[in-house]
Amino acid sequence: MNQLHTPNASRNQETGRLSFMDSVSRPSSGRVPRGGLSRRHSRRVIGPMRIFSARPCTFTIVSALKKTALTVAAAALLPTLAVAPASADTHDNKPDKKQPNPPASMSTVGGAQLGRAGTQVSLGPGAPVLPKDVSGRSWIVADAESGDVLASHNAHWRLPPASTLKMLFADTVLPRLPKTEIHKVAPQELADVGEGSSLVGVKEDHTYSVHDLWLGVFLRSGNDAVHVLSEMNGGVPKTVQDMQAHADELQALDTHVVSPDGYDANGQVSSAYDLTLIARSGMQKKDFREYCSTASAKFPGEQVKGKARKTFEIQNTNRLLTGDYGIDPYQGIAGVKNGNTTHAGATFTGVAERNGKVLLVTVMNPGSDESQAVYKEAGRLLDWGFAAAGKVKPVGELVAPKSVDAAPSANGAAPAKNGAPAKTVAAKASSGGVGTALAVTGGVLAVLAAGVFLVNRRWPLRRR
């Protein structure tokens, strides 16, 4: 990633590109200018390809290409171990600065091995070695269905998350607001959007559906849309509080929320482990799955009295989903979220399905100068994970939420010895759940509206 140092430039939260907005379109107060966004942020976004349709679309008209009904193994949940303090690192991602070392003591949620610094992997016979060209400060590869962590590197290092934190925002707030609700944006709802933020083009005194705003959050990572939805949820402070409570419920205990949009803020941190937990939770929600897998959509433009309201196209900034110069869409990718800020560097959490196996990967802050490094490294780790599945011994587990971990199992089964719940096979007819919500046809992935991402008798899911 090229690092340019320009007095009036700030790094865009998603794309990593520099924005020269500060000196030409934003007042010194940091408020979004009255009358809407600059031309740079409201312009039509056209990407190199669309993978779902020959024409722009919202997720509501993305068709399922092929149903996959898979019976999946339930998560084997390790008991929550003691959480040791882990120092947050907020150093700038600049090549002239010495790269920090991970803290000596990190959380052991999910297993003691995950609390160790460095790379953790246990290769079995026939297992491929990990790719060498992975430079992320922290990363993790996990089986999304069983919860097994196949390999990790500084999994619990608390680092700035950038816009990957929007996964927690969506997982917390999305179920609370009906998608058909129409909202008129008040000027104060956009007042505190941070300088250099990634924006979708929300304008004050204009009306938007909740559905429109979520498209803005997931596709363009619009901090303007996040702030409006936060106000609809009762305000930014309440939303931050709700997000923190939800993180604690998920046992994402490395995560400290300061802003709902992931904008750089003092003390705002998460970890590769936590972001993977959060993504796993989000992918169990139908709307979350469909929004994060949408490649392109139409977004409402300016309202002019007496004229029909026009729309403009927005495209998902997840480059493993849409592709970009020097990078192809990843076969089987289904989301989830990317981010980029000055302090966080590039971050990415993705989920992909191949040959009936569903993997989650998170990469935080690669140190490589390789173009699109966060995506390429995530792709290499996914490739390794699919090749290594069944040939490695797990180094840890993605734990269940606190309320689920404390509840008795749905089928009355006692937990395994040492408090670790036993793995069970969820049969189609008896579990009450359904299989994987992912399907691949000709390398193009569609998310099925009727599916549930994870089946677990001890963690029964509802159709949501």
Image: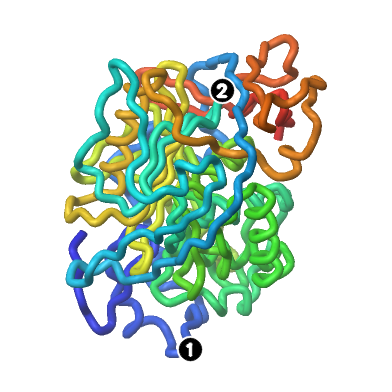
Element on which disc 1 rests: loop
Q: Residue at x 19, y 67 (%)?
A: 95
Image spot of residue 28 (x, y percent)? 43, 90
Image spot of residue 218 (x, y percent)? 50, 50
Q: Nearer the viewer, residue 182 or 240?
A: 240
- Label 1 sits on what residue type? Ser
Q: Which residue is mark 2?
A: 436
Q: Residue at x 62, y 33 (%)?
A: 77
Q: Residue at x 48, y 27 (%)?
A: 446
Q: Nearer the viewer, residue 271 or 35?
A: 271
Image spot of residue 20 (x, y percent)? 29, 76
Label 2, label 1: how many angstroms apart (C-alpha)?
A: 48 Å
Q: Which residue is mark 1?
A: 29
Horizontal placement of 402 versus 17: left or right? right
Quarter the C terminus occupies: top right
Image spot of residue 70 (x, y percent)? 56, 15
Quarter the N terminus occupies: bottom left
- Label 2 sits on what residue type? Thr
Q: Residue at x 75, y 18 (%)?
A: 432
Rendered image quadrant of residue 453:
top right
First of labels 2, 1 by sequence position = 1
Residue 317 visible, this angle: no
